[in-house]
């Protein structure tokens, strides 16, 4: 007879872990106890050595669906006498320092079965959940994760729900959001001024009716509001775009099942696994050639973003949409906000901010405590791994595992696509996508998340790391936080942060080459970086800029980012073309401005120089007439990628100039080839393909040369350009063909959503070096 204590830390509370322990204890015939403690779940078991060892194996290998074990420790104890059962006992007091809160997860099959059974008390109840599914992060006010500390605290359990909640063999045992129609949250439908129209299932039925009639609805979801309309109705889609001021950017679509997904997209097995899994992100897939949706859903790309229902409310809505037959059930489900603002969270807030967009509102009375947008990803068919474009619902607050223990550091992130990261022990916790730090609303959202994450992680930063740019709102905030906490604030250059993030995700030690390819990053020399080959050592924190793209001019400064024709004009000027040798595509609309720009370039007024890869795509897109002005970030590059004629095999020259230090990848020669073919009337699709191939070849030559000089064979790829599927697939192929080992992002986005992770792990290492 032996006795053993097991201490399990990680995502082990609120996920059915104690009932799981109770069950495997019964199966292995051991006695003992299990409880929630401040360090996780503590179990003591007693039996024969074979019984206890069997329990230990099951504990490690048969964890519940939502559980994530970070550490599992055991120690042998002295056996006790008189113990004849296994019990779940009351939780210990104290705050949960080593307990991870689960992300919100999709409705499980068992709960769906309850909702679809007319004899079940939860038939079509929009808030059905159990320990294997439902809201977690977005309803959690603080730790420990118990009902009084969630937004369910104001819904006392009825007798039936309480009996489930207290029964260790019930799948709703200690499911904190547990509820039913008798005791839980309710939905109601309101008009554009907030006047109630209907409640309960009748509200869901009427909502479906109004969506079929072409109305735009604001629908309260899990982490905020969606703006919804019938995705098959071109007029409804146009109406939503006009009201939301989103003329071109692709819109996400929700459909009820995989059969509908296959009607709209070409689906790989990995796509289906993500679509049907517990995280339920939006997945970008190639459009089906015969898809029935209007082109205005995603006009600039050959891809469509699809997701399946992930809350009971969504499932109930689609059941009502399917009643009476008809065609495809598909809903636009886009963030409930105006462009650049955070997603709406509360009922009054939504009515105030969205009343000019939505015709009707579906409200409910379960408070959303934490804003959290839908996550977005696409599969990389070369690596078989995801490219995460937006990390939020379903992923946050799951950590990135780091090497060894370490101090708490805050990485405050960049200006665009901002997220923050806190480190704790051997983990880094990136926040959900916060957005562009361009207004007070987003700044307020940022402060909410910073306070919340410090609370649920029970940490206080010893160091704050910000971007090198002095005028970013996140830089100002970093200085404020540092002063409040009386801790130092350090700055890390944007592109080095990109590479440190890749290294952290892939647990890379020592030195790597890094290709950081994006739109904008404040450089150490005061210029705008964005096409960089870097040396980075993650242990000594040595950095060096080894090579860059040729400089482009940005005549008009920020205006050039919004109007790519200006960047094209600046490139032509650098190449010596002062006057049009053919009718440049932008002249029809901007002839007068083009003449004025000549003077700006001649006098070098407000024309900053950049090595940006993103601006290179902008210039090429404008030169071939695809995009002179943008309505959303990355539009010109997206159109250039879409235009490619994939039958084309030729590549433009993009030579490496090694006389300068740092070396220069001559991307101006690449653009000169674009100009020449455009002047000679070569089809845009051919030019677009030759441009992509030329850039990939140039980057491969650059990497090969630098790697040989330094004796390095590992290269890390990061930056927003790695969202381009052509680059994400064909660049790693080219690099591996020359013998390099390639590392990319799979847990955080390659865009600026990874910057705070890189900042935080860099700062953490710096503190460890300084000890």
Image (cartoon, rainbow, N blue to C red):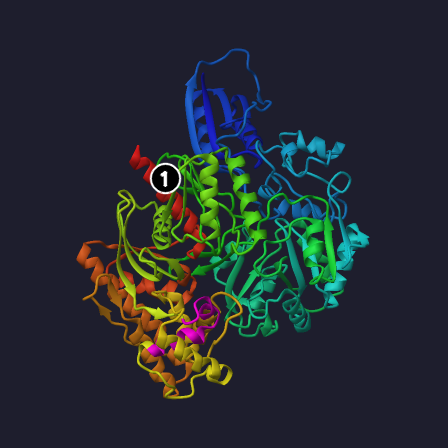
Q: Quadrant of the N terminus?
A: top left
Q: In the visual, does 199 lie left or right of 76?
A: right
Magenta stretch, overall SS: helix
Residue 278 makes an appearance in the image: no
Q: Is residue 218 above or below residue 540?
A: below
Q: Residue at x 32, y 68 (%)?
A: 551
**Mark 1 closeness class: few <14, some 14–19, many ≥20 residues within 10 Å:** many
Q: Quadrant of the C terminus?
A: top left
Q: Is residue 519 above or below residue 122?
A: below
Residue 525 point in image, percent of width and height: 31, 58
Q: Residue at x 36, y 72 (%)?
A: 604
Residue 613 part of the magenta segment: no
Q: Residue at x 68, y 33 (%)?
A: 164
Could you say which quadrant of the image residue 129 lies in? top right
Residue 571 part of the magenta segment: yes
Residue 259 point in image, percent of width and height: 60, 63
Q: Is residue 62 above or below residue 307?
A: above
Assign a secondary structure to mark 1.
helix
User: Which residue, as the protein is rendered here, is positioned at the far top?
Assistant: 81
Residue 291 point in image, percent of width and height: 58, 72
Could you say which quadrant of the image residue 611 lies in? bottom left
Please provide the residue range marked out in magenta: 555-573
Q: In the visual, does 769 lie left or right of 643?
A: left
Please state which of residues 136 and 111 is positioned toward the viewer in this rendering. 136
Count of residue discs:
1
Residue 76 makes an appearance in the image: yes
Residue 528 point in image, percent of width and height: 36, 61
Q: Residue at x 55, y 11 (%)?
A: 82
Where does label 1 land, which residue?
764
Q: In the visual, does 572 lie left or right of 133?
A: left
């Amino acid at each position: 007879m032996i006795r053993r204590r097991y201490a399990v830390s990680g995502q082990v509370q609120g996920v059915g872990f104690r009932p799981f322990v109770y069950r495997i204890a019964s199966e292995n015939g051991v006695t003992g106890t299990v409880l929630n403690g401040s360090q996780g779940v503590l179990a003591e078991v007693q039996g024969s050595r074979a019984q206890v060892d069997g329990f230990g194996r099951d504990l490690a290998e048969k964890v519940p669906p939502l559980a994530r074990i970070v550490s599992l420790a055991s120690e042998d104890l002295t056996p006790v006498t008189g113990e004849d059962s296994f019990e779940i006992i009351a939780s210990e007091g104290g705050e949960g320092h080593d307990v991870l809160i689960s992300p919100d997860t999709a409705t499980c099959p068992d709960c769906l079965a309850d909702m679809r059974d007319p004899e079940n008390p939860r038939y079509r109840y929009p808030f059905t959940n159990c320990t294997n599914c439902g809201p977690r992060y977005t309803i959690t006010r603080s730790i420990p994760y118990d009902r009084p500390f969630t937004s369910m605290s104001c819904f006392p359990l009825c007798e039936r729900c309480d009996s489930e909640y207290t029964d260790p063999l019930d799948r709703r045992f200690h499911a904190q959001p547990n509820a039913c129609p008798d005791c839980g949250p309710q939905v109601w439908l309101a008009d554009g001024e907030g006047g109630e129209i209907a409640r309960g299932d009748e509200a869901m039925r009427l909502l479906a009716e109004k969506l079929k009639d072409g109305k735009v609805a604001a629908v309260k979801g899990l982490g905020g509001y969606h703006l919804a309309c019938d995705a098959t109705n071109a007029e409804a889609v146009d109406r939503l775009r006009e009201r939301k001021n989103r003329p071109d950017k692709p819109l996400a679509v929700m459909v009820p099942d995989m059969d509908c997904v296959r009607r709209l997209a070409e689906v790989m097995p990995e796509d289906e696994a993500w679509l049907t899994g517990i995280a339920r992100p939006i997945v970008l897939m190639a459009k089906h050639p015969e898809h029935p949706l209007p082109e205005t859903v995603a006009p600039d790309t050959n891809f469509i973003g699809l997701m399946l229902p992930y809350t009971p409310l969504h499932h109930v809505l689609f059941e009502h949409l399917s009643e009476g037959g008809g065609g495809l059930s598909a809903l636009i489900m886009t963030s409930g906000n105006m462009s650049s603002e955070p997603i709406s969270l509360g009922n009054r807030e939504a009515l105030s901010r969205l009343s000019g967009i939505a015709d009707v509102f579906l409200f409910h009375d379960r408070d959303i405590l934490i804003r959290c947008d839908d996550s977005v990803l696409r599969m990389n068919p070369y690596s078989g791994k995801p490219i995460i474009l937006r990390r939020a619902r379903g992923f946050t607050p799951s950590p990135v595992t780091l090497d060894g223990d370490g101090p708490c550091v805050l990485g405050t992130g960049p200006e665009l696509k901002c997220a923050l990261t806190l480190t704790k022990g051997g983990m880094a916790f990136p926040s959900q996508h916060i957005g562009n730090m361009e207004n007070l609303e987003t700044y307020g959202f940022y402060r909410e998340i910073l306070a919340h994450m410090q609370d649920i992680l029970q940490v206080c930063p010893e160091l704050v790391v910000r971007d090198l740019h002095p005028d970013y709102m996140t830089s100002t905030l970093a200085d404020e936080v540092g002063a409040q906490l009386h801790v130092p604030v350090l700055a890390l250059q944007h592109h080095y942060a990109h590479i440190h993030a890749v290294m952290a995700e892939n647990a890379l030690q020592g030195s790597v080459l890094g290709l950081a390819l994006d739109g904008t990053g404040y450089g150490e020399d005061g210029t705008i970086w964005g096409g960089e080959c870097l040396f980075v050592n993650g242990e000594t924190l040595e950095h060096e800029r080894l090579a860059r793209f040729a400089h482009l001019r940005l005549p008009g400064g920020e205006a050039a980012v919004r109007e790519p024709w200006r960047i094209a004009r600046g490139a032509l000027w650098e190449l010596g073309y002062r006057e049009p040798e053919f009718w440049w595509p932008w002249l029809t609309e901007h002839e007068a401005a083009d003449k004025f720009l000549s003077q700006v370039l001649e006098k070098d007024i407000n024309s900053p120089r950049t090595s940006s890869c993103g601006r290179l795509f902008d210039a090429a897109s404008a030169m071939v007439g695809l995009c002179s002005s943008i309505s959303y970030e990355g539009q010109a590059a997206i159109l250039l990628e879409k235009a490619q004629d994939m039958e084309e095999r030729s590549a433009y020259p993009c030579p490496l100039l090694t006389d300068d230090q740092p070396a220069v990848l001559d991307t101006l020669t690449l653009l000169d080839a674009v100009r020449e073919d455009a002047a000679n009337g070569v089809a845009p699709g051919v030019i677009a393909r030759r441009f992509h191939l030329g850039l990939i070849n140039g980057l491969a030559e650059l990497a090969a040369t630098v790697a040989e000089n330094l004796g390095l064979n590992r290269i890390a790829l990061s930056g927003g350009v790695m969202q381009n599927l052509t680059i994400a697939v064909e660049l790693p192929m080219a690099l591996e063909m020359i013998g390099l080992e390639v590392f990319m992002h799979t847990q955080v986005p390659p865009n600026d959503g990874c910057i705070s992770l890189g900042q935080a792990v860099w700062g953490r290492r710096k503190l460890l070096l300084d000890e």
